[in-house]
Amino acid sequence: MPVPDPAAPTPADVDVRPATVFEDVATLVGPRRPDATVCFCLSYRIGSTESRRLRGPARGERVRELCAEDPPPGVVAYLDGEPVAWAAIHRRADTSFATNRRIPHVDDVDAWSLWCLRVRPGYRRTGLTAPLIEGAVRFARDRGAPAVEAYPLDNQGERIDTTMAYVGTRTMFEQAGFTVAAATSSTLDGFPRVLMRQALDGS
């Protein structure tokens, strides 16, 4: 794996693009073994019945199909042409969050959900999260989203397990311009999750 420059990248160094290249998405969220049945960031994007049915390589093929759709399943951040971070974002009504009983609906705004942030090992703690979120929000805005929601942990500064950090933290999203819109009954790693929103059209 390429060794990143020890200096933290500036937002101008990071190029966030729609996730249309399957191989780059697989590099960031795919399993190490192609026959492994793991998330591949599909758990919230498609229905639970389909997600359970897709096993091994079939999960990757489903993601390949999503990368060819408009809109694709999220965004990829690149640094010096190398894929280094991923964000899953899509219209909430077309994800499992549409029927998630633990994550409330604040109102009738046709919001988009931003539910997964992953930075590639070796590039973490280098300042990539802020431009990644900014790029994901821009991606949604460009496609007519009136608002973007996220469901991060409200960990109040306490340490969280890195495997559970994919949803982000409240502080992370506050710094990106999101505000708390509602509490949820969802917890992760022992911490409550909050529904945060950034309005894109004054809603």
Image: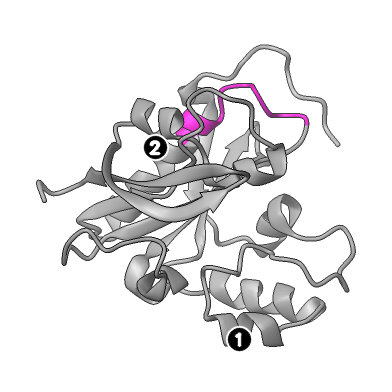
Could you say where residue 203 lies in the image, as x and y percent from the top left? Answer: 11, 51
Identity, as a three-letter code, of the amino acid under mark 1: Glu
Mark 2 and mark 1 residues within 8 Å of each other at the beta carbon:
no
Give the answer, above or below, for where 164 lies relative to 104. above
Q: What secondary structure prevails in the magenta region?
A: loop
Residue at 66% across, 11% down:
7
Which quarter of the figure has residue 160? top right
Residue at 35% across, 45% down:
137
Real-space Cα separation, disc 2 to disc 1, in angstroms: 30 Å
Q: From the image, which quarter does the N terminus lie in? A: top right
The one nearer the camera, 193 or 15, is 193
The one nearer the camera, 154 or 14, is 154
Relative side of 127 to 12, left or right: right
Residue at 69% across, 65% down:
39
Tell me if residue 129 is in the magenta stretch: yes
Closer to the N terminus: mark 2 or mark 1?
Answer: 1
Q: Note whether residue 65 is visible.
A: yes
Outermost residue to the top: 7
> Mark 2 = which residue?
134
Could you say where residue 127 lies in the image, as x and y percent from the top left? Answer: 56, 23
Relative side of 107 to 131, left or right: left
The one nearer the camera, 162 or 33, is 162
Outermost residue to the left: 202
Could you say where residue 162 lies in the image, as x and y percent from the top left? Answer: 70, 37
Q: Name the secondary structure under disc 2.
A: helix
Which quarter of the figure has residue 134? top left
Tell me if residue 50 is in the magenta stretch: no
Identity, as a three-letter code, of the amino acid under mark 2: Glu
Give the answer, above or below, for where 177 lies relative to 135. above
